[in-house]
Image: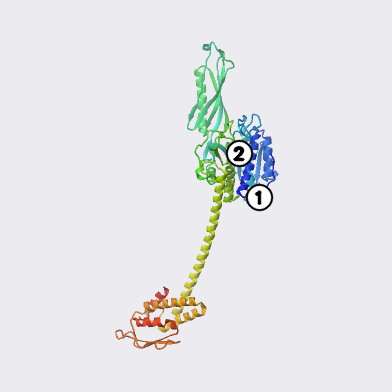
Amino acid sequence: MVATAASSTPPTTSGEYIAFFDRLVTLRRHFHTHPELSFREVNTQQTLRRFLIDEAGIAEQDIHACAGTGKLATVMDHASLSSSSRDMDALPMTEENPSLEYKSTTAGAAHMCGHDGHMTSLAGFAQLLQRRREHLPVNTCVRLLFQPAEEGHFGAVAMIKGGCLDGVDEVYGYHNVNFPEGVVAVKAGAVMSHGNTFRITLTGPGGHGSAPHQTLTITSRNISAHDSAIVTIAQVHGGEADNVIPSSVTMSGTTRDFAPAVADVIRTRMSAIVTHTAAAFGVQGTIQFDERYPATVNAVDQAEIVRKVAQSVAGEANVTADGLPLCASEDFSFYLKERPGAFFFIGTVSSASQNRTLHSSTFDFNDTILPVSVRMFLELAQHRLDCQLYDPVEMARIHCPMPSNTGATHAHTDAMLMIVDKTFARRRYFREKQREHRRKVYADEAAVKAQYEHLQSVLDNLQAGRPSSVAPREASDGPLSWYSVATVFKREAHRVLKDRQSLVTQTQEYQSLIQAMQRFAVMNIPEPLALLPAVKNEDEFVQFEFQASDERDDLFTCMDRIQFTWPGTIQMFRRLVETNMKAVNFPHYVETAST
Protein backbone atom coordinates (compact mmCIF):
# COMPACT_ATOMS: atom_id res chain seq x y z
CA MET A 1 0.00 0.00 0.00
CA VAL A 2 1.25 3.42 -0.94
CA ALA A 3 0.73 5.96 1.84
CA THR A 4 0.04 9.62 1.19
CA ALA A 5 0.68 12.64 3.37
CA ALA A 6 -2.09 13.60 5.75
CA SER A 7 -4.14 16.60 4.74
CA SER A 8 -4.46 19.44 7.24
CA THR A 9 -8.18 19.78 6.59
CA PRO A 10 -10.94 17.22 6.15
CA PRO A 11 -12.96 16.92 2.92
CA THR A 12 -15.53 19.67 2.45
CA THR A 13 -17.14 19.29 -0.97
CA SER A 14 -19.10 16.36 -2.34
CA GLY A 15 -16.28 15.58 -4.77
CA GLU A 16 -13.70 15.53 -1.97
CA TYR A 17 -15.79 13.10 0.06
CA ILE A 18 -16.20 10.84 -2.95
CA ALA A 19 -12.41 10.85 -3.38
CA PHE A 20 -12.01 10.16 0.34
CA PHE A 21 -14.20 7.04 0.18
CA ASP A 22 -12.56 5.93 -3.06
CA ARG A 23 -9.32 5.90 -1.09
CA LEU A 24 -10.98 3.79 1.62
CA VAL A 25 -12.19 1.34 -1.04
CA THR A 26 -8.59 0.97 -2.21
CA LEU A 27 -7.50 0.27 1.37
CA ARG A 28 -10.29 -2.27 1.87
CA ARG A 29 -9.37 -4.16 -1.29
CA HIS A 30 -5.73 -4.19 -0.24
CA PHE A 31 -6.78 -5.97 2.97
CA HIS A 32 -8.92 -8.35 0.91
CA THR A 33 -6.03 -9.24 -1.37
CA HIS A 34 -3.66 -9.89 1.54
CA PRO A 35 -5.64 -11.73 4.27
CA GLU A 36 -3.99 -13.13 7.40
CA LEU A 37 -5.28 -15.72 9.86
CA SER A 38 -5.89 -15.26 13.59
CA PHE A 39 -2.91 -13.92 15.59
CA ARG A 40 -0.88 -13.75 12.37
CA GLU A 41 -2.09 -10.31 11.24
CA VAL A 42 1.43 -8.86 11.17
CA ASN A 43 1.29 -7.14 7.76
CA THR A 44 -2.30 -6.06 8.39
CA GLN A 45 -1.19 -4.45 11.64
CA GLN A 46 1.62 -2.55 9.90
CA THR A 47 -0.66 -1.37 7.09
CA LEU A 48 -3.13 -0.01 9.63
CA ARG A 49 -0.36 1.68 11.58
CA ARG A 50 1.00 3.47 8.51
CA PHE A 51 -2.49 4.60 7.46
CA LEU A 52 -3.35 5.94 10.92
CA ILE A 53 -0.08 7.88 11.13
CA ASP A 54 0.46 9.03 7.54
CA GLU A 55 -3.10 9.59 6.36
CA ALA A 56 -5.29 9.90 9.44
CA GLY A 57 -2.67 12.08 11.15
CA ILE A 58 -2.80 10.35 14.53
CA ALA A 59 0.37 10.83 16.57
CA GLU A 60 2.61 7.78 16.68
CA GLN A 61 2.70 7.80 20.47
CA ASP A 62 -1.12 7.43 20.51
CA ILE A 63 -1.00 4.10 18.64
CA HIS A 64 -0.14 0.99 20.63
CA ALA A 65 0.03 -2.73 19.96
CA CYS A 66 -2.34 -4.93 21.94
CA ALA A 67 -2.91 -8.70 22.09
CA GLY A 68 0.10 -9.31 19.90
CA THR A 69 -1.16 -8.31 16.45
CA GLY A 70 -3.94 -5.95 17.55
CA LYS A 71 -3.89 -2.16 17.63
CA LEU A 72 -5.14 0.56 19.94
CA ALA A 73 -5.48 4.06 18.46
CA THR A 74 -6.54 6.93 20.72
CA VAL A 75 -7.85 10.33 19.65
CA MET A 76 -7.58 13.07 22.33
CA ASP A 77 -5.93 10.88 24.95
CA HIS A 78 -6.78 12.60 28.20
CA ALA A 79 -9.60 10.52 29.69
CA SER A 80 -11.33 7.67 27.90
CA LEU A 81 -15.05 7.80 27.31
CA SER A 82 -16.06 5.61 24.41
CA SER A 83 -14.53 2.85 22.34
CA SER A 84 -15.16 1.43 18.88
CA SER A 85 -13.97 -2.03 17.93
CA ARG A 86 -13.47 -4.05 14.79
CA ASP A 87 -11.83 -7.30 13.76
CA MET A 88 -8.76 -7.93 11.58
CA ASP A 89 -8.40 -11.66 10.90
CA ALA A 90 -9.43 -13.74 7.89
CA LEU A 91 -11.10 -17.15 7.72
CA PRO A 92 -9.07 -20.32 7.09
CA MET A 93 -10.74 -21.06 3.73
CA THR A 94 -10.14 -20.65 0.01
CA GLU A 95 -11.82 -17.84 -1.89
CA GLU A 96 -13.71 -18.73 -5.04
CA ASN A 97 -14.16 -15.33 -6.66
CA PRO A 98 -12.18 -15.67 -9.89
CA SER A 99 -13.71 -12.51 -11.38
CA LEU A 100 -12.47 -10.26 -8.56
CA GLU A 101 -9.29 -8.41 -9.46
CA TYR A 102 -8.46 -8.09 -5.77
CA LYS A 103 -9.23 -11.67 -4.70
CA SER A 104 -7.13 -13.30 -2.00
CA THR A 105 -3.55 -14.14 -2.90
CA THR A 106 -2.94 -16.06 0.33
CA ALA A 107 -3.54 -19.79 0.15
CA GLY A 108 -6.01 -21.05 2.74
CA ALA A 109 -6.99 -17.57 3.95
CA ALA A 110 -9.75 -15.25 2.80
CA HIS A 111 -11.81 -12.36 4.13
CA MET A 112 -15.15 -14.14 3.76
CA CYS A 113 -16.74 -12.47 6.81
CA GLY A 114 -16.14 -8.83 5.89
CA HIS A 115 -13.43 -8.04 8.41
CA ASP A 116 -11.55 -6.18 5.67
CA GLY A 117 -14.51 -3.78 5.44
CA HIS A 118 -14.82 -3.51 9.22
CA MET A 119 -11.19 -2.44 9.59
CA THR A 120 -11.57 0.09 6.78
CA SER A 121 -14.71 1.60 8.34
CA LEU A 122 -12.90 2.20 11.59
CA ALA A 123 -9.83 3.60 9.79
CA GLY A 124 -12.02 6.07 7.86
CA PHE A 125 -13.76 7.08 11.08
CA ALA A 126 -10.35 7.59 12.71
CA GLN A 127 -9.25 9.91 9.90
CA LEU A 128 -12.35 12.12 9.96
CA LEU A 129 -12.37 12.17 13.77
CA GLN A 130 -8.71 13.15 14.01
CA ARG A 131 -9.21 16.07 11.59
CA ARG A 132 -11.76 17.59 13.98
CA ARG A 133 -10.19 16.61 17.28
CA GLU A 134 -10.13 20.26 18.38
CA HIS A 135 -13.95 20.09 18.60
CA LEU A 136 -13.83 17.26 21.15
CA PRO A 137 -14.53 18.34 24.73
CA VAL A 138 -11.54 18.62 27.02
CA ASN A 139 -10.60 15.44 28.90
CA THR A 140 -12.45 13.10 26.57
CA CYS A 141 -11.26 10.64 23.97
CA VAL A 142 -12.30 7.95 21.55
CA ARG A 143 -10.32 4.70 21.60
CA LEU A 144 -10.28 2.61 18.43
CA LEU A 145 -9.84 -1.14 18.92
CA PHE A 146 -8.45 -3.07 15.97
CA GLN A 147 -8.87 -6.59 17.28
CA PRO A 148 -7.11 -9.73 16.00
CA ALA A 149 -8.35 -13.33 16.10
CA GLU A 150 -12.10 -12.89 16.12
CA GLU A 151 -12.77 -16.11 14.22
CA GLY A 152 -12.83 -18.61 17.03
CA HIS A 153 -9.62 -17.61 18.81
CA PHE A 154 -10.99 -15.24 21.47
CA GLY A 155 -9.15 -12.13 20.33
CA ALA A 156 -11.49 -9.95 22.41
CA VAL A 157 -10.45 -11.76 25.58
CA ALA A 158 -6.79 -11.15 24.73
CA MET A 159 -7.51 -7.47 24.04
CA ILE A 160 -9.28 -7.06 27.39
CA LYS A 161 -6.35 -8.70 29.17
CA GLY A 162 -4.10 -6.24 27.31
CA GLY A 163 -5.97 -3.31 28.88
CA CYS A 164 -7.96 -2.13 25.86
CA LEU A 165 -10.96 -1.23 28.03
CA ASP A 166 -9.04 0.49 30.82
CA GLY A 167 -10.81 3.78 31.50
CA VAL A 168 -13.42 3.14 28.80
CA ASP A 169 -17.05 3.92 29.67
CA GLU A 170 -18.92 2.60 26.62
CA VAL A 171 -18.14 0.40 23.63
CA TYR A 172 -19.74 0.20 20.17
CA GLY A 173 -19.23 -2.01 17.14
CA TYR A 174 -20.96 -3.29 14.01
CA HIS A 175 -21.01 -6.23 11.61
CA ASN A 176 -22.09 -6.42 7.99
CA VAL A 177 -25.00 -8.79 7.41
CA ASN A 178 -27.03 -10.05 4.46
CA PHE A 179 -29.95 -7.70 5.12
CA PRO A 180 -31.07 -5.18 2.44
CA GLU A 181 -28.33 -2.68 1.61
CA GLY A 182 -28.20 0.35 3.88
CA VAL A 183 -30.55 -1.09 6.51
CA VAL A 184 -29.32 -0.70 10.10
CA ALA A 185 -30.55 -3.36 12.51
CA VAL A 186 -30.33 -2.93 16.27
CA LYS A 187 -32.31 -3.78 19.39
CA ALA A 188 -31.90 -3.87 23.15
CA GLY A 189 -31.07 -7.19 24.75
CA ALA A 190 -29.62 -10.22 23.00
CA VAL A 191 -28.74 -9.67 19.34
CA MET A 192 -26.50 -12.73 18.90
CA SER A 193 -26.51 -16.09 20.61
CA HIS A 194 -24.50 -17.76 23.32
CA GLY A 195 -22.62 -20.60 21.64
CA ASN A 196 -21.23 -23.90 22.94
CA THR A 197 -19.72 -26.90 21.24
CA PHE A 198 -20.12 -30.42 22.54
CA ARG A 199 -18.64 -33.87 21.91
CA ILE A 200 -20.51 -37.11 22.61
CA THR A 201 -18.60 -40.38 22.83
CA LEU A 202 -20.33 -43.78 22.75
CA THR A 203 -18.20 -46.82 23.67
CA GLY A 204 -19.09 -50.53 23.33
CA PRO A 205 -17.73 -53.88 22.03
CA GLY A 206 -16.61 -53.85 18.42
CA GLY A 207 -16.43 -56.74 15.96
CA HIS A 208 -16.39 -58.01 12.41
CA GLY A 209 -18.84 -56.63 9.92
CA SER A 210 -20.07 -60.16 9.10
CA ALA A 211 -21.22 -60.78 12.67
CA PRO A 212 -23.16 -57.74 13.86
CA HIS A 213 -25.19 -59.90 16.23
CA GLN A 214 -22.08 -60.24 18.35
CA THR A 215 -21.85 -56.42 18.78
CA LEU A 216 -24.08 -53.51 19.82
CA THR A 217 -24.80 -50.72 17.29
CA ILE A 218 -26.28 -47.24 17.81
CA THR A 219 -26.80 -44.56 15.22
CA SER A 220 -28.21 -41.41 16.78
CA ARG A 221 -28.84 -37.92 15.61
CA ASN A 222 -30.68 -35.58 17.94
CA ILE A 223 -31.72 -32.04 16.98
CA SER A 224 -33.85 -30.14 19.51
CA ALA A 225 -35.05 -26.72 18.34
CA HIS A 226 -37.51 -24.37 20.03
CA ASP A 227 -38.12 -20.66 20.49
CA SER A 228 -34.98 -19.83 22.42
CA ALA A 229 -32.43 -22.57 21.70
CA ILE A 230 -30.99 -24.75 18.93
CA VAL A 231 -29.08 -28.00 19.40
CA THR A 232 -27.34 -29.38 16.32
CA ILE A 233 -25.33 -32.58 15.92
CA ALA A 234 -23.25 -31.81 12.86
CA GLN A 235 -20.63 -34.59 12.82
CA VAL A 236 -20.68 -38.33 13.42
CA HIS A 237 -17.37 -40.23 13.29
CA GLY A 238 -16.69 -43.92 13.84
CA GLY A 239 -14.59 -46.72 12.42
CA GLU A 240 -11.71 -46.98 10.02
CA ALA A 241 -12.77 -49.70 7.56
CA ASP A 242 -15.97 -50.69 5.79
CA ASN A 243 -15.97 -54.20 7.17
CA VAL A 244 -15.22 -53.36 10.80
CA ILE A 245 -17.82 -52.33 13.37
CA PRO A 246 -16.07 -49.72 15.54
CA SER A 247 -15.94 -49.90 19.31
CA SER A 248 -16.25 -46.14 19.66
CA VAL A 249 -18.35 -43.47 17.90
CA THR A 250 -18.13 -39.72 18.47
CA MET A 251 -20.67 -37.06 17.65
CA SER A 252 -20.15 -33.32 17.88
CA GLY A 253 -22.10 -30.17 17.25
CA THR A 254 -23.21 -26.87 18.72
CA THR A 255 -25.79 -25.46 21.08
CA ARG A 256 -27.10 -21.93 20.77
CA ASP A 257 -29.25 -19.96 23.17
CA PHE A 258 -29.83 -16.42 24.37
CA ALA A 259 -30.04 -16.77 28.15
CA PRO A 260 -27.95 -18.55 30.82
CA ALA A 261 -31.00 -20.33 32.25
CA VAL A 262 -31.75 -21.93 28.88
CA ALA A 263 -28.11 -23.01 28.56
CA ASP A 264 -28.36 -24.78 31.93
CA VAL A 265 -31.48 -26.65 30.80
CA ILE A 266 -29.75 -27.75 27.59
CA ARG A 267 -26.72 -29.06 29.47
CA THR A 268 -28.84 -30.99 31.97
CA ARG A 269 -31.14 -32.57 29.39
CA MET A 270 -28.41 -33.52 26.93
CA SER A 271 -26.28 -35.12 29.66
CA ALA A 272 -29.25 -37.16 30.85
CA ILE A 273 -30.26 -38.23 27.34
CA VAL A 274 -26.74 -39.34 26.37
CA THR A 275 -26.13 -41.23 29.63
CA HIS A 276 -29.48 -43.03 29.87
CA THR A 277 -29.95 -43.74 26.14
CA ALA A 278 -26.50 -45.33 25.93
CA ALA A 279 -27.19 -47.37 29.09
CA ALA A 280 -30.44 -48.64 27.59
CA PHE A 281 -28.43 -50.17 24.72
CA GLY A 282 -25.72 -51.52 26.97
CA VAL A 283 -22.96 -49.06 26.06
CA GLN A 284 -21.29 -46.17 27.82
CA GLY A 285 -22.02 -42.59 26.82
CA THR A 286 -20.24 -39.41 27.86
CA ILE A 287 -20.66 -35.78 26.81
CA GLN A 288 -18.24 -32.87 27.09
CA PHE A 289 -19.19 -29.20 26.62
CA ASP A 290 -16.78 -26.52 25.48
CA GLU A 291 -17.85 -22.97 26.38
CA ARG A 292 -17.35 -20.60 23.45
CA TYR A 293 -18.98 -17.16 23.28
CA PRO A 294 -21.51 -15.56 25.62
CA ALA A 295 -24.63 -14.00 24.16
CA THR A 296 -24.11 -10.56 22.65
CA VAL A 297 -26.40 -8.42 24.78
CA ASN A 298 -26.92 -4.73 24.07
CA ALA A 299 -27.53 -2.36 26.97
CA VAL A 300 -30.98 -0.77 26.78
CA ASP A 301 -29.83 2.88 26.84
CA GLN A 302 -26.98 2.41 24.37
CA ALA A 303 -29.15 0.40 21.97
CA GLU A 304 -31.71 3.22 21.97
CA ILE A 305 -28.93 5.74 21.26
CA VAL A 306 -27.77 3.67 18.27
CA ARG A 307 -31.36 3.38 17.02
CA LYS A 308 -31.89 7.16 17.11
CA VAL A 309 -28.52 7.84 15.49
CA ALA A 310 -29.26 5.25 12.79
CA GLN A 311 -32.54 7.00 11.97
CA SER A 312 -30.66 10.19 11.15
CA VAL A 313 -27.97 8.32 9.21
CA ALA A 314 -29.93 5.70 7.27
CA GLY A 315 -33.45 7.13 7.41
CA GLU A 316 -36.22 6.02 9.74
CA ALA A 317 -37.59 3.50 7.21
CA ASN A 318 -34.21 1.77 7.09
CA VAL A 319 -33.82 1.16 10.84
CA THR A 320 -35.28 -2.09 12.13
CA ALA A 321 -35.09 -4.84 14.74
CA ASP A 322 -36.52 -7.43 12.34
CA GLY A 323 -34.31 -10.48 11.93
CA LEU A 324 -32.77 -10.07 15.37
CA PRO A 325 -31.45 -11.80 17.34
CA LEU A 326 -29.15 -13.78 15.07
CA CYS A 327 -28.25 -17.35 16.01
CA ALA A 328 -24.60 -16.76 15.17
CA SER A 329 -22.13 -15.83 17.93
CA GLU A 330 -19.67 -12.95 18.19
CA ASP A 331 -16.75 -12.28 20.51
CA PHE A 332 -17.76 -8.62 20.79
CA SER A 333 -19.96 -10.11 23.51
CA PHE A 334 -16.91 -10.18 25.81
CA TYR A 335 -16.63 -6.38 25.56
CA LEU A 336 -20.32 -5.98 26.35
CA LYS A 337 -19.92 -8.12 29.46
CA GLU A 338 -17.30 -5.66 30.69
CA ARG A 339 -18.82 -2.32 29.58
CA PRO A 340 -22.26 -1.05 28.52
CA GLY A 341 -22.58 -0.59 24.79
CA ALA A 342 -24.29 -1.77 21.64
CA PHE A 343 -23.54 -3.94 18.63
CA PHE A 344 -25.45 -3.18 15.43
CA PHE A 345 -25.68 -4.53 11.89
CA ILE A 346 -25.56 -2.88 8.45
CA GLY A 347 -27.19 -4.60 5.49
CA THR A 348 -25.18 -5.30 2.33
CA VAL A 349 -27.55 -7.07 -0.10
CA SER A 350 -28.34 -5.09 -3.26
CA SER A 351 -29.44 -5.91 -6.79
CA ALA A 352 -25.85 -6.74 -7.71
CA SER A 353 -25.09 -10.42 -8.29
CA GLN A 354 -22.20 -10.61 -5.81
CA ASN A 355 -22.80 -13.02 -2.93
CA ARG A 356 -23.15 -11.28 0.47
CA THR A 357 -23.65 -14.41 2.62
CA LEU A 358 -21.06 -14.54 5.41
CA HIS A 359 -18.52 -17.39 5.44
CA SER A 360 -19.35 -18.27 1.84
CA SER A 361 -16.42 -18.92 -0.52
CA THR A 362 -17.87 -16.39 -3.01
CA PHE A 363 -18.55 -13.63 -0.48
CA ASP A 364 -17.28 -10.06 -0.92
CA PHE A 365 -17.83 -7.03 1.31
CA ASN A 366 -20.10 -4.33 -0.17
CA ASP A 367 -18.04 -1.12 -0.38
CA THR A 368 -21.23 0.95 -0.68
CA ILE A 369 -21.85 0.72 3.08
CA LEU A 370 -18.51 2.28 4.03
CA PRO A 371 -20.04 5.81 4.18
CA VAL A 372 -22.91 4.46 6.30
CA SER A 373 -20.59 2.86 8.84
CA VAL A 374 -18.24 5.85 9.00
CA ARG A 375 -21.09 8.29 9.57
CA MET A 376 -22.63 5.97 12.18
CA PHE A 377 -19.43 6.09 14.23
CA LEU A 378 -19.11 9.88 13.76
CA GLU A 379 -22.70 10.48 14.87
CA LEU A 380 -22.24 8.20 17.87
CA ALA A 381 -19.10 10.11 18.86
CA GLN A 382 -20.94 13.43 18.56
CA HIS A 383 -23.88 12.14 20.59
CA ARG A 384 -21.88 10.55 23.39
CA LEU A 385 -19.34 13.38 23.67
CA ASP A 386 -22.01 16.09 23.27
CA CYS A 387 -20.17 18.01 20.57
CA GLN A 388 -20.46 18.81 16.86
CA LEU A 389 -17.61 17.47 14.78
CA TYR A 390 -19.34 17.98 11.43
CA ASP A 391 -22.42 20.08 10.66
CA PRO A 392 -25.53 18.49 9.07
CA VAL A 393 -24.52 19.50 5.53
CA GLU A 394 -21.11 17.85 5.93
CA MET A 395 -22.72 14.75 7.43
CA ALA A 396 -25.05 14.58 4.44
CA ARG A 397 -22.05 14.74 2.12
CA ILE A 398 -20.56 11.77 3.96
CA HIS A 399 -23.79 9.80 3.56
CA CYS A 400 -27.39 10.64 2.63
CA PRO A 401 -30.22 8.35 3.74
CA MET A 402 -31.37 6.11 0.92
CA PRO A 403 -34.94 5.24 -0.04
CA SER A 404 -36.07 2.05 1.69
CA ASN A 405 -34.65 -1.20 0.29
CA THR A 406 -32.82 0.39 -2.63
CA GLY A 407 -29.16 0.73 -3.48
CA ALA A 408 -27.23 3.98 -3.30
CA THR A 409 -25.71 5.55 -6.39
CA HIS A 410 -23.54 8.60 -6.96
CA ALA A 411 -26.45 10.18 -8.85
CA HIS A 412 -28.75 9.61 -5.87
CA THR A 413 -26.14 10.99 -3.49
CA ASP A 414 -25.58 14.11 -5.62
CA ALA A 415 -29.32 14.69 -5.87
CA MET A 416 -29.71 14.36 -2.10
CA LEU A 417 -26.81 16.74 -1.48
CA MET A 418 -28.35 19.26 -3.85
CA ILE A 419 -31.60 19.04 -1.89
CA VAL A 420 -29.71 19.47 1.39
CA ASP A 421 -27.80 22.50 0.10
CA LYS A 422 -30.97 24.12 -1.23
CA THR A 423 -32.78 23.37 2.01
CA PHE A 424 -30.15 25.12 4.12
CA ALA A 425 -30.07 28.03 1.67
CA ARG A 426 -33.84 28.42 2.03
CA ARG A 427 -33.52 28.24 5.79
CA ARG A 428 -30.91 31.01 5.79
CA TYR A 429 -33.14 33.14 3.50
CA PHE A 430 -36.20 32.73 5.68
CA ARG A 431 -34.23 33.34 8.88
CA GLU A 432 -33.04 36.66 7.42
CA LYS A 433 -36.60 37.51 6.40
CA GLN A 434 -37.75 36.74 9.93
CA ARG A 435 -35.09 39.08 11.30
CA GLU A 436 -36.21 41.85 8.94
CA HIS A 437 -39.82 41.28 9.98
CA ARG A 438 -38.87 41.48 13.67
CA ARG A 439 -36.94 44.70 13.06
CA LYS A 440 -39.98 46.19 11.29
CA VAL A 441 -42.29 45.08 14.10
CA TYR A 442 -40.00 46.68 16.67
CA ALA A 443 -39.93 49.91 14.63
CA ASP A 444 -43.74 49.88 14.29
CA GLU A 445 -44.09 49.29 18.01
CA ALA A 446 -41.81 52.24 18.70
CA ALA A 447 -43.85 54.44 16.35
CA VAL A 448 -47.11 53.37 17.98
CA LYS A 449 -45.64 54.04 21.39
CA ALA A 450 -44.51 57.48 20.29
CA GLN A 451 -47.96 58.23 18.86
CA TYR A 452 -49.55 57.03 22.09
CA GLU A 453 -47.29 59.28 24.12
CA HIS A 454 -48.13 62.19 21.82
CA LEU A 455 -51.88 61.61 22.22
CA GLN A 456 -51.42 61.30 25.95
CA SER A 457 -49.67 64.66 25.96
CA VAL A 458 -52.58 66.14 23.99
CA LEU A 459 -54.98 64.78 26.57
CA ASP A 460 -52.88 66.21 29.38
CA ASN A 461 -52.85 69.59 27.65
CA LEU A 462 -56.63 69.55 27.30
CA GLN A 463 -56.99 68.69 30.94
CA ALA A 464 -54.55 71.44 31.91
CA GLY A 465 -56.58 73.94 29.87
CA ARG A 466 -59.77 73.43 31.89
CA PRO A 467 -61.01 76.44 33.88
CA SER A 468 -59.99 76.25 37.50
CA SER A 469 -63.65 76.21 38.50
CA VAL A 470 -64.15 72.80 36.91
CA ALA A 471 -63.69 69.81 39.24
CA PRO A 472 -61.28 66.96 38.41
CA ARG A 473 -62.42 64.94 35.42
CA GLU A 474 -63.11 61.78 37.41
CA ALA A 475 -65.91 63.45 39.33
CA SER A 476 -66.85 66.49 37.24
CA ASP A 477 -70.08 66.87 35.31
CA GLY A 478 -69.79 70.64 34.78
CA PRO A 479 -69.31 72.41 31.43
CA LEU A 480 -65.87 72.88 29.85
CA SER A 481 -65.27 76.34 28.41
CA TRP A 482 -65.20 76.51 24.62
CA TYR A 483 -62.40 79.00 25.00
CA SER A 484 -60.29 76.42 26.85
CA VAL A 485 -60.91 73.78 24.20
CA ALA A 486 -60.14 76.18 21.38
CA THR A 487 -56.97 77.36 23.10
CA VAL A 488 -55.64 73.81 23.36
CA PHE A 489 -56.39 73.04 19.74
CA LYS A 490 -54.84 76.34 18.75
CA ARG A 491 -51.65 75.44 20.60
CA GLU A 492 -51.60 72.03 18.92
CA ALA A 493 -52.11 73.60 15.51
CA HIS A 494 -49.19 75.95 16.06
CA ARG A 495 -47.05 73.03 17.22
CA VAL A 496 -47.88 71.19 14.03
CA LEU A 497 -47.05 74.25 11.93
CA LYS A 498 -43.74 74.63 13.72
CA ASP A 499 -42.67 70.93 13.79
CA ARG A 500 -43.95 69.78 10.39
CA GLN A 501 -42.65 71.55 7.30
CA SER A 502 -44.23 69.25 4.77
CA LEU A 503 -47.47 70.63 3.42
CA VAL A 504 -48.93 67.15 2.98
CA THR A 505 -48.11 66.22 6.53
CA GLN A 506 -49.57 69.47 7.81
CA THR A 507 -52.77 68.87 5.89
CA GLN A 508 -53.12 65.35 7.25
CA GLU A 509 -52.57 66.50 10.79
CA TYR A 510 -55.06 69.32 10.37
CA GLN A 511 -57.60 66.88 9.06
CA SER A 512 -57.02 64.58 12.00
CA LEU A 513 -57.43 67.47 14.43
CA ILE A 514 -60.63 68.60 12.74
CA GLN A 515 -62.04 65.06 12.86
CA ALA A 516 -61.13 64.81 16.53
CA MET A 517 -62.79 68.14 17.23
CA GLN A 518 -65.89 67.06 15.32
CA ARG A 519 -66.18 63.84 17.33
CA PHE A 520 -65.52 65.76 20.53
CA ALA A 521 -68.17 68.38 19.86
CA VAL A 522 -70.87 66.02 18.61
CA MET A 523 -70.52 63.67 21.60
CA ASN A 524 -70.11 66.33 24.30
CA ILE A 525 -72.67 69.05 23.45
CA PRO A 526 -76.04 67.47 24.27
CA GLU A 527 -78.34 70.52 24.33
CA PRO A 528 -79.52 72.50 21.22
CA LEU A 529 -78.68 76.18 20.96
CA ALA A 530 -79.67 78.91 18.54
CA LEU A 531 -77.20 81.06 16.70
CA LEU A 532 -77.91 84.75 17.11
CA PRO A 533 -75.67 86.92 14.93
CA ALA A 534 -73.66 85.48 12.07
CA VAL A 535 -69.89 85.31 12.20
CA LYS A 536 -68.58 88.80 12.32
CA ASN A 537 -64.94 88.27 11.53
CA GLU A 538 -62.84 85.44 10.06
CA ASP A 539 -59.47 87.06 10.58
CA GLU A 540 -57.00 86.37 13.38
CA PHE A 541 -59.74 86.52 16.04
CA VAL A 542 -63.27 85.42 15.37
CA GLN A 543 -66.16 85.98 17.74
CA PHE A 544 -69.14 83.67 18.10
CA GLU A 545 -72.13 84.85 20.09
CA PHE A 546 -74.47 82.27 21.54
CA GLN A 547 -77.79 82.66 23.31
CA ALA A 548 -80.07 79.99 24.71
CA SER A 549 -83.05 79.10 22.55
CA ASP A 550 -86.58 79.92 23.58
CA GLU A 551 -87.34 76.25 24.20
CA ARG A 552 -84.35 75.72 26.55
CA ASP A 553 -83.75 79.23 28.02
CA ASP A 554 -82.87 77.59 31.35
CA LEU A 555 -79.50 76.41 30.07
CA PHE A 556 -77.75 79.77 29.73
CA THR A 557 -78.68 83.10 31.23
CA CYS A 558 -75.91 85.08 29.68
CA MET A 559 -73.85 85.33 26.55
CA ASP A 560 -70.73 83.20 26.24
CA ARG A 561 -68.08 84.53 23.90
CA ILE A 562 -65.45 82.39 22.23
CA GLN A 563 -62.33 83.53 20.48
CA PHE A 564 -60.57 81.09 18.15
CA THR A 565 -57.43 81.77 16.14
CA TRP A 566 -57.38 79.01 13.50
CA PRO A 567 -59.42 80.09 10.46
CA GLY A 568 -59.35 76.57 9.00
CA THR A 569 -61.74 75.36 11.71
CA ILE A 570 -64.28 78.21 11.59
CA GLN A 571 -66.56 76.59 9.03
CA MET A 572 -66.64 73.38 11.05
CA PHE A 573 -67.67 75.25 14.20
CA ARG A 574 -70.25 77.22 12.23
CA ARG A 575 -71.84 73.95 11.05
CA LEU A 576 -71.79 72.54 14.58
CA VAL A 577 -73.50 75.66 15.98
CA GLU A 578 -76.04 75.71 13.16
CA THR A 579 -77.00 72.03 13.79
CA ASN A 580 -78.01 71.94 17.44
CA MET A 581 -74.77 72.22 19.36
CA LYS A 582 -74.75 70.59 22.74
CA ALA A 583 -73.40 71.69 26.11
CA VAL A 584 -69.86 70.49 26.87
CA ASN A 585 -69.61 67.85 29.62
CA PHE A 586 -66.07 67.08 30.76
CA PRO A 587 -66.49 63.31 31.49
CA HIS A 588 -67.84 62.90 27.98
CA TYR A 589 -64.81 64.71 26.67
CA VAL A 590 -62.41 62.40 28.49
CA GLU A 591 -64.03 59.32 27.00
CA THR A 592 -64.04 60.80 23.51
CA ALA A 593 -60.47 62.08 23.66
CA SER A 594 -59.20 58.68 24.67
CA THR A 595 -60.67 57.22 21.50
Q: Tell me residue 290's x, y (percent).
A: 58, 28
Q: Tell me residue 115's x, y (percent).
A: 61, 36
Q: Residue at x 49, y 18 (%)?
A: 280
1 or 2: tag closer to the N-terminus = 1
Q: Tell me residue 171's x, y (percent).
A: 59, 42
Q: To which quarter of the image does residue 532 belong?
A: bottom left
Q: Tell me residue 80's x, y (percent).
A: 63, 45
Q: Which colour scheme is used?
A: rainbow
* Residue 118, disc: 2
* 45, 230: nearer the viewer: 45
| Badge 1: residue crowd in 10 Å (few <14, some 14–19, many ≥20) | few
Answer yes or no: is residue 466 visible.
no
| Secondary structure found at label 2 | helix
Q: Does residue 264 appear left or right of residue 577 in this picture?
A: right
Which residue is labeled 1 in the image? Answer: 9
Of the two numbered discs 1 and 2 in the rendering, the one whose residue sits closer to the viewer? 1
